[in-house]
Amino acid sequence: MSANTQSRSRSIKERGCQLLAFARKQLDHGSSGFDLFLALFGSRGKARMLFPTKKEWLAFERSDENKELQKLIENLPTSNQLALNGDFALTLRLPKSVHTALTKEAAAEGVSLDQLCLSKLVAQLRELV
């Protein structure tokens, strides 16, 4: 491995460690899983600041630090899945254009956005089963 490659790898590793430390600190301060996700990956999230280019992000994705971060996230209790009378709530981030199209379709059908999305999801699942 060349010195330049070692330097870049070390830099990715160091920034990965910094991101992990940031995530742990957020959790220590009581952040929910959703808040942590936004703090890490939101439009002004720490990951975007530490890995601003696609090349850097792809390098980080292959790192041990990313694997450790993913395990940390996977083991969090999710605040966006709440037991409600045996049902579960799911927060889904959509592009504005998709949200607008779904909202218009729901209005045209005379149903709520929730009902429309659920019917579309169930229809897709039925096709798979």
Image (spheres, rainbow, N blue to C red):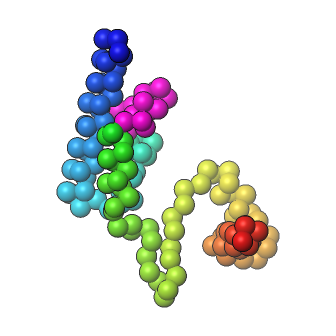
The answer to which quarter of the image holds residue 46 is top left
Q: Residue at x 26, y 30 (%)?
A: 14
Residue 30, percent across and down? 23, 61
- Total marks placed: 0
Instruction: Residue 120: tell me if it is visible.
Output: no
How far from the left and from the top, in percent, is residue 9?
33, 24
Q: Residue furthest front?
A: 1
Magenta-colored segment: predominant secondary structure? helix
**Most foreground residue, 97 or 10:** 10
Does 102 sit left or right of 91 as displayed?
Answer: right
Percent across and percent down for residue 104 are 74, 63
Question: As displayed, is residue 52 above or below residue 102?
Answer: above
* Quarter occupied by the N terminus: top left
Please name the residue shown 68% across and 51% down the image. Answer: 97
The reply to whether the magenta stretch includes residue 62 is yes
Residue 84: horizontal and vertical position, in percent?
A: 47, 83
What span is in magenta?
46-63
Residue at position x 31%, y 18% from top? 6
Query: Residue 16 vs residue 56: left or right?
Result: left
Position of 46 relative to 70 (above/below) = above
Residue drawn 43% across and 37% down? 61
Q: Quadrant of residue 56?
A: top left
Tell whether 95 sits left or right of 59: right
Q: Is residue 75 magenta?
A: no
Task: Give the side of residue 78 with respect to residue 111, left or right.
Answer: left
Residue 47 visible in the picture:
yes
Against 70, is 17 above or below? above
Residue 106 sits in quarter: bottom right
Instruction: Tell me the quadrant of the picture where the C terminus can be found.
Output: bottom right
